Amino acid sequence: MKTGDGWDEVTFNNRDPVYLQVVQHFKEQIVTSKLGAGQVIPSRRELGALLKINPNTAQRAYKEMEEQQLIVTEGNSPSRITSDASILHTIRSELLEVAVDAFVASVRKIDIPVEELLDLVKVKYVEERSTEIRSDAGGDKYD
């Protein structure tokens, strides 16, 4: 990852510990393929500077990611994203499950038939994906 790529997207909330938000950001970067298996990541000190957080907070985030086997640090070598496919798959499943749980909790009160809900989700998802593809290709999202 080039210095600065994706790090300006991090916005911290006041609810959750910053180090856990950093771990969450790494997971999102992995799931969206902005960080790949085996990729070298910034040092703890570099990450602290990039995110404007205390280096001890960055250290705590790295320790948490090592415990979750999300990153690997061997000796004096730079830390890397794990290459373990099962862990990478688990991260994707975990993020997807959290998002679906939040979605279901928010729409449950509306009492909509599940078929209607699934149709609406499919339409919105396809619209959003096509908007992303157009904007990634340089097109205007209002074309």
Image (tube, grey):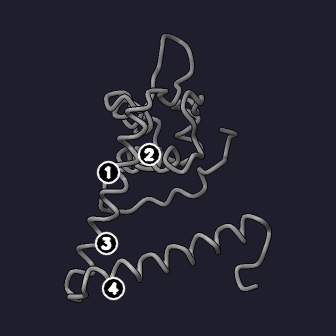
C-alpha span from label 3 to label 2: 19 Å
Q: Residue 75 location, x and y as percent?
A: 49, 10
Q: Which mark, residue 17?
A: 1
Q: Residue 99 location, x and y as percent?
A: 34, 63
Give whichever of discs 1 and 2 has the lower sequence position: 1
Q: Which residue is mark 4?
A: 116
Quarter where residue 96 is shown: bottom left
Give whichever of discs 1 and 3 has the lower sequence position: 1
Give whichever of discs 2 and 4 has the lower sequence position: 2
Q: For the residue labelled by badge 3, is the local secondary structure a helix, a strand or a loop?
A: helix
Give whichever of discs 4 and 3 has the lower sequence position: 3
Q: Identify the residue shown where x is 58% and y is 33%.
A: 42
Q: Are marks 3 and 2 in contact (CB under 8 Å)?
A: no
Query: Left or right: 70 with respect to 48?
Result: left
Quarter where residue 105 is shown: bottom left
Which of discs 1 and 4 lies nearer the camera? The answer is 4
Q: For the residue labelled by badge 2, is the local secondary structure a helix, a strand or a loop?
A: helix
Q: Which residue is mark 2?
A: 27
Q: Residue 64 location, x and y as percent?
A: 34, 34
* Amino acid tagged 4: Glu
Crowdedness of circle 1 by 10 Å Cα count: few (<14), some, many (20+)? few
Q: Which residue is mark 3?
A: 103
Q: For the residue labelled by badge 4, is the local secondary structure a helix, a strand or a loop?
A: helix
